[in-house]
Image (cartoon, grey):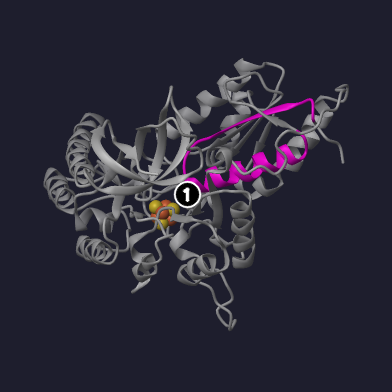
Amino acid sequence: MPTFYDRSAALVTLGCKVNQSESEALGRRLSERGLRLVPFDSSADLYVINTCTVTATADRKSRQLIRRARRHNPSSLVIVTGCYASVHRSHLHSMAQADLVVSNDSKGRLADLALEALGRATRTASGVAAPADVGAAPHGHTRAFVKAQDGCADFCAYCIVPYARGRPTSVPAQEIVSRIRSLASQGCQEVVLSGVHLGSYGADQDHSSPDLYDLRRLIVEILRDTAIPRLRLSSLEPQDISPGLFELWRDPRLCRHLHLPLQSGCNRTLARMRRRYTCQDFASLVEEARRAIPGVSITTDLIAGFPGESPEDFLESLAFIEGVRFARAHVFPYSPRPGTLAAGLPDQVPEPVKRERCARLRAVSQQSAAAFRRGFLGQTLEVLWEERAVGNRWSGLANNYLRVSAESALSLTNRITPTLITALEGEGLKGSVLA
Ligand code: SF4
């Protein structure tokens, strides 16, 4: 098996946490085979662009990154993968900037394909040095994304993901547990359990089997069988949350953060989007979460200007969203994805109207986010410190996903410390390390 100790690779990832977990796994495999991982903006022998196609902006960024890679090193090997690569394969071929296009269903073989192609491209390479970071956990051992699930069969009217990622599949629980055990033994402090439709974990199993898993059982086993200090969940679809799931948060290792994509606060729009809950269901869920998980941060995704969203629908949605008081909202203008149901719906909303609605949604969300942050002034949060920003200034993530900075002469990388919150700072908080 050839090794590539004199070669470098740069990976860049757009989109969801599943893409991030897949890039981390790929980085690990390339690094095990001797490739040196370098920042994307440097000159590398291999570039992998793990793309996203969830919006028109994601498409544009994917194309820009491909062109950027080619500019950084015109003789490099450029591989494009991810959802943009799966859905717009022919466009990528016509762009002629990528050497290899690997769709999501072949992503598991990407490291082998890359090494094979790199071997062909660099047959004259010589010189072997010892690998510096074989088997290293990503992010300097601090946080890692572990993929538990892929694919979706919900076919929400606006969403391209079921076409880009295919049917739901779950990673066997024992594989996930052993991966997390290994990360914990390498010093990783936080695992983000990721899935395209994480709440449907286990739905693809043989239902006649006596040994069925769902998300609840998976979480219970991770907490029981690993020593990972923190476990965070990626996005959960509101309809997937089973009664009593929030009781699991009695274990303080589960991060007090829930990302629940609402998309619209108007029942008529939700129905047209083919979402499987109503605003009332969502409000009850939020109430239950806040009761069961004190201090929980509830974040969301919102779409402005879905086809047929009338001014009244929008105002109803805005009022509902204001009432929920999200800790953060990602607001997107509706962007038609060719091939989806919504792209062919009548009453498409003009772009300037979408922009104006986005601005109003962002204003409301920014207010509730600031109020949420203010609620922690004078309180102590557990912060996982990631890196020294400048001088003695450190940056880290609180258990509830708020970014915190602090001054400290101590070496805090990869430590979780109680931190007294003293001020608001940008979209985060400022604190004073207590230990
Ligand atoms: S649940 Fe809906 S929005 Fe989420 S990935 Fe599936 S189709 Fe897309």
Looking at the image, can residue 166 be seen?
no
Q: Where is residue 32 in the image (x, y as percent from the top left)?
A: 75, 41
Residue 184, placed above or below residue 2: below
**In which image quadrant can residue 328 be found?**
top left
Looking at numbered disc 1 in the image, what kind of residue is underneath it? Val
Nearest the camera: 23 or 271? 23
User: Looking at the picture, how far across and down is residue 259, in whole percent?
Assistant: 35, 52
Residue assigned mark 1: 161
Camera sees residue 58: yes
Residue 70 is situated, as x and y percent measured from the top left of the image, at: 62, 19
User: Pointer 1: residues within 10 angstroms few (<14), some, or many (20+)?
Assistant: many
Q: In this view, does 71 lie to the left or right of 400?
A: right
Residue at 18%, 36% in the rendered image? 363
User: What element does badge 1 sit on?
Assistant: helix
- In depth, the one of 314 and 14 nearer the eye is 14
Location of ligand 1 given as a quarter of the image: bottom left
Please identify the quadrant where the N terminus is shown: top right
Q: Which residue is drawn at 56% across and 52% down?
A: 146
The segment highlighted magenta reads 5-34
Q: Which quarter shows the C terminus?
A: top left
Magenta stretch: includes residue 33: yes
Label 1 residue near ligand 1, CB within 8 Å: yes
Q: Which residue is drawn at 39% across and 58% down?
A: 236
Residue 396 included in the magenta stretch of the image: no
